[in-house]
């Protein structure tokens, strides 16, 4: 990094904080005051159109092969944990290979962990030496290389950023990280808050367009703690107005947020216990693992089948949501073979069925036990996922002009029946997803 570049970065940081202070002083950061810029509203629609992204959890925790929460779960002292950095050398990391595999899978964006709860930054930061460039023999900016490759290959870049930190003394001790060597009563919230904002400014001024900042960790503090989120969101939108802000706080969206997250659950469901919040009118995204864990776990070979993942993607689209599917790279930086296989098979399905997913919205018929619907213009796609009979009643107000099987365009018999339409297939549905394409009268 040249001295001139460092000077410009510091100047950018100073200007960003001055802008944030001015906006806050003018009263623009108060609840309910957020008015998305036109660029932001356009980006929201592009986000909703994309439907499929890949999450990447990668960091020092990957070396221990016990998931991204290992520092907390094993009560590893922060000084001992920090020694991992001296041996972190992901020799097989290749940004071009990562992005190519993700693009071939049909994903439209990637979300990478820039800093997880262990406090280690996977990018070059002037705010700390505890980062991948300064603290490891690897000495390469992983986020920077991934950002450049995403831009080159036309894949959106989203960035995960943790609000909590098990390493730093200035982060006031929360509900987690009690066994990492930090003492109750420590903490300097103002200093930590400025540190976070300085890092976010780096992420939003050094790596080109960032499609979204994906926050996590608000649940670490008691209810009522003032995270000063709206101020932080003002900073983000001042730096990149189109950047989407989402927060995995498991609550209804706060002012300044642009999309709503659901962890391990589809919107409106709460099987995992994280998603009891009401579904908003914002763009929606559900995140899910390929196996059981987010970060690499050497004992976790319980991978979901490609069929299961494809059906989850279809169900998400039927609820007008994106699927953010996670991969935990191995310590050497390579994607596990099982993950690569899933990506390839998902890509094959989307290559032939993407028309029924990309750019659609949740269809006229709410999700049913048999499946979901998606819609684009006057075309309604009926995704039959679980049905054993040839006939299926669809509660539908609109008039149907034409019904065909999506795969081969062979005609499907249909009749108006009471408050809907009854379709009859030549044989019972089979395979991952039987799609009936209905053309509706305008």
Image: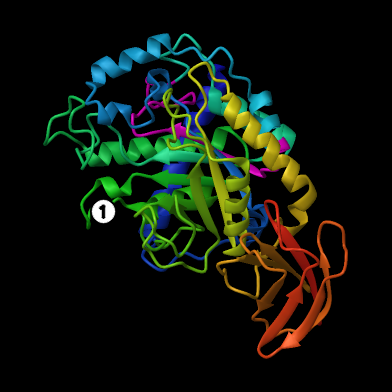
Instruction: Classify the position of the C terminus by image quarter.
Output: bottom right
Across and down, in percent, residue 193 comes to: 31, 41
Q: Is residue 311 above or below residue 131?
A: below
Whether residue 177 is in magenta: the answer is no
Residue 191 screen position, x and y as percent: 27, 36
Q: Is residue 101 visible?
A: yes
Q: Decide: few, some or many residues near mark 1? Use Cα within 10 Å; few <14, some 14-19, many ≥20.
A: few
What x and y, as percent, mark residue 262?
Answer: 45, 54
Name the outermost residue toward the bottom: 418
Residue 188: give x, y in percent of width and height.
21, 37
Which element type, helix, strand or loop, lies under badge 1? Answer: loop
* Camera-side residue of 252 and 344: 344
Q: How many marks?
A: 1
The image quadrant of residue 148 is: top right
Indicate left or right for 136 with 241 as reference: left
Quadrant occupied by the N terminus: top right
Height in image: 293 above or below 129? below
Residue 133 against residue 392 in the figure, above or below? above
- 237 or 333: which is nearer to us? 333
Bounds of the magenta span?
103-131
**Residue behind mark 1:** 226
- Is 128 contained in the magenta span? yes
Q: Residue at x 52, y 64 (%)?
A: 282
Left or right relative to 324: residue 356: right
Q: Quadrant of residue 217?
A: top left
Q: Nearer the viewer, residue 15 or 417?
A: 417
Q: Is residue 234 visible in the rendered structure shown here?
A: no
Residue occupying the point 61% across, 52% down: 311
Please, what is the dominant secondary structure of the magenta stretch?
A: loop
Task: Please report the residue visible at 56 percent of the width from the left and 69 percent of the height from the top.
Answer: 368
Q: Is residue 408 left or right of residue 202?
A: right
The residue lying at 58 percent from left, 19 percent from top is: 93
């Amino acid at each position: 990094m040249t001295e001139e570049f460092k000077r410009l970065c510091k100047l950018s940081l100073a200007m960003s904080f001055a802008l944030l202070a001015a906006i806050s002083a003018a009263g623009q950061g108060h609840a309910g005051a957020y008015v998305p810029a036109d660029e932001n509203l356009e980006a929201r629609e592009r986000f909703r159109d994309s439907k499929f992204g890949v999450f990447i959890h990668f960091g020092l925790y990957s070396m221990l092969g016990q998931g991204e929460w290992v520092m907390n779960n094993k009560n590893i002292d922060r000084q001992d944990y920090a020694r991992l950095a001296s041996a972190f050398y992901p020799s097989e990391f290749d940004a071009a290979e990562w992005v190519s595999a993700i693009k071939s899978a049909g994903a439209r964006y990637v979300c990478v962990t820039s800093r997880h709860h262990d406090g280690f930054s996977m990018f070059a930061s002037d705010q700390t030496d505890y980062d991948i460039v300064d603290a490891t023999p690897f000495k390469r900016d992983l986020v920077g290389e991934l950002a450049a490759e995403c831009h080159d290959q036309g894949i959106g870049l989203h960035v995960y950023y943790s609000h909590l930190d098990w390493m730093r003394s200035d982060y006031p001790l929360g509900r987690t990280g009690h066994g990492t060597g930090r003492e109750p009563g420590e903490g300097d919230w103002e200093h930590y808050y400025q540190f976070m904002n300085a890092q976010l400014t780096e992420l939003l001024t050094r790596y080109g367009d960032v499609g979204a900042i994906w926050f996590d960790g608000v649940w670490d503090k008691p209810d009522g703690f003032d995270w000063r989120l709206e101020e932080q969101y003002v900073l983000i939108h001042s730096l990149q107005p189109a950047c989407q802000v989402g927060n995995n706080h498991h609550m209804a969206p706060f002012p300044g947020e642009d999309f709503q997250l659901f962890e391990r659950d589809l919107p409106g469901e709460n099987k995992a216990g994280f998603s009891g919040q009401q579904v908003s009118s914002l763009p929606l995204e559900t995140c899910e693992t390929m196996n059981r864990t987010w970060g690499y776990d050497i004992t976790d070979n319980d991978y979901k089948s490609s069929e299961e993942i494809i059906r989850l993607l279809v169900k998400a689209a039927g609820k007008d949501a994106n699927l953010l599917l996670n991969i935990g790279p191995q310590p050497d930086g390579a994607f596990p073979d099982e993950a690569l296989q899933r990506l390839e098979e998902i890509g094959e399905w989307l290559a032939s069925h993407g028309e029924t997913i990309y750019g659609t919205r949740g269809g006229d018929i709410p999700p049913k036990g048999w499946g979901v619907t998606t819609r684009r213009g006057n075309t309604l796609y009926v995704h039959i996922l679980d049905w054993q009979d040839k006939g299926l009643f669809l509660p539908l107000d609109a008039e149907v002009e034409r019904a065909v099987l999506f795969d081969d365009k062979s005609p499907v018999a249909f009749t108006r029946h009471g408050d809907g339409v009854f379709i009859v297939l030549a044989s019972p549905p089979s395979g991952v997803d039987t799609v009936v394409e209905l053309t509706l009268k305008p």
